Amino acid sequence: MDLILKANREKLRKQYTENLEAVLALQGTLIADILPSVTDELGLDTESIQWAKEWLNDTCSLFQILRRNKFTRSFAMESIRKTLAWRFNHLWPPNSPLRMPIVHCLPPPATDPFGRPILVVKVVSFNDSSDAYKPLIIRGLESLRLHLKRLNENSPQSPNPTLQYVLLLDLKNLSTQSLNIDLVTWTLREVIPQFPGLLAAAFMINYSWAHAGIWSIAKRVLPARALSRVFFPTQEELTAYFSPSMLPKDYGGTLASLTELQDPLWVDPPSLQLDANGQPSPSAPSIDPVPTKAPLITSIPSTSLLNPFFGYPVSSSGGSPSLHHGRRRKRDLARTLLVLAWRRWRRIMTCVWILVFILTVRGRRKWFARSPSGHSLWATVCGPATLL
């Protein structure tokens, strides 16, 4: 595992060093030539143009797009143009980061052995409509991009920038029976290509035999590049790779628990002032991460992805989610289990009731036809011919 990750990292670093000049040249062309045409096409104002320049000045993001297009300039320019239009459709106007309890970035100096930030995601089942989660996924990935950009602000042309995260994917609360395949497929096909190269590796933790079984099937169709970045480590292997000092105690480390650690991911930096060439203005204020408060949450459904106490009603006190009744009540959990059972079995139960209704109607009709009183009543209402 260590050798594979080291080889991948060295390859990426070499590609960045060898193609940095090409990325900077492409960056200048995009700001000078492509952005004006996109401005005319979309009718952008001054504020939206500055927002577009901020993204185009993200050297690491442009490198990842160029790399995804096999360092072919013409293909990369077309891809960037399409991505810019996509960003205006899905991310404009920009909003404050939306904190999600299932996503947590470990604070410095916690990194993997190669200096990459560690991202922890507690996967849960998606029981509501997929459309409700799509904007959250898009904004979450944008927050990841902005965090990497802030890490590299002090040295934007450094030969060794922070380009990727390593992911700890906690599968403890994920049920394979309620896995939303449509949402996963949409994320992989529609969203991930707009944020290429963010993840260096994914470590699956707290997995069951069912999760491992699904992976044994999936890895037969995935490319070798993807297989080299997904691992199912034991607790000993996980601790040996990261070291205990880099992991929260939730996962066998010596850091504080995940809920007690500050998260550097959810920050809202000041607006970046750019000059006419799209470069940071000398008079622009320095960008220091400023923690922002999570959006005020008045109530969260018991089965919602955003509920940190899944299965129980949640309210807020000062914007911080807490149990509505101050404790986990059995009646609330029973109600949630009934709702989940109904969502899972309602189609089958509907079919059963329809079948019962049909059989009942048929039985009544036979009784009408065979019984003397039923025969006379049926003949009176529907006519004798209906019994022939």
Image (tube, rainbow, N blue to C red):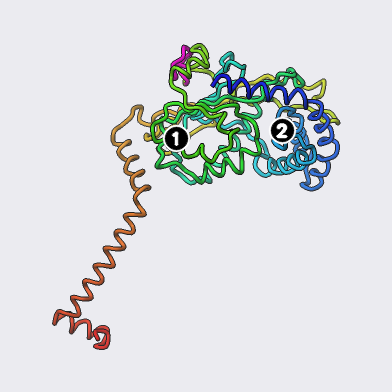
Q: Position of residue 44 (x, y in %)?
A: 77, 43
Q: Position of residue 56 (x, y in %)?
A: 76, 33
User: What's the CA distance linking mark 1 and mark 2?
Assistant: 32 Å
Q: Position of residue 337 (x, y in %)?
A: 33, 40
Asked if 7 appears above or below 136 in the picture, the reply is above
Q: What residue is rendered at 39% in x and 42% in y?
A: 177
In the shown orientation, is residue 78 left or right of residue 221?
A: right
Which residue is more in the foreground, 47 or 365?
A: 365
- Answer with the quarter of the image where residue 99 lies: top right
| Residue 35, magenta (yes or no) | no
* Residue 21 appearing in the image: yes
Circle 1 residues within 10 Å: few <14, some 14–19, many ≥20: many
Q: Secondary structure at mark 2?
A: helix
What residue type is disc 1 on?
A: Val
Please tell me how many numbered marks the rendered image carries: 2
Q: Secondary structure at mark 1?
A: loop
Q: What residue is rendered at 57% in x and 41% in y?
A: 187
Segment colored magenta: 248-258
Q: Position of residue 188 (x, y in %)?
A: 58, 40
State the quadrant of the N terminus: top right
* Residue 319 appearing in the image: no
Q: Which residue was labeled with disc 1?
A: 124
Which residue is more in the foreground, 108 or 235?
A: 235
Q: Where residue 67 is drawn, which disc sits there?
A: 2
What residue type is disc 2 on?
A: Arg
Q: What residue is rendered at 37% in x and 48% in y?
A: 343
- Answer with the quarter of the image where residue 115 lies: top right
Name of the residue lying farthest toward the left: 372
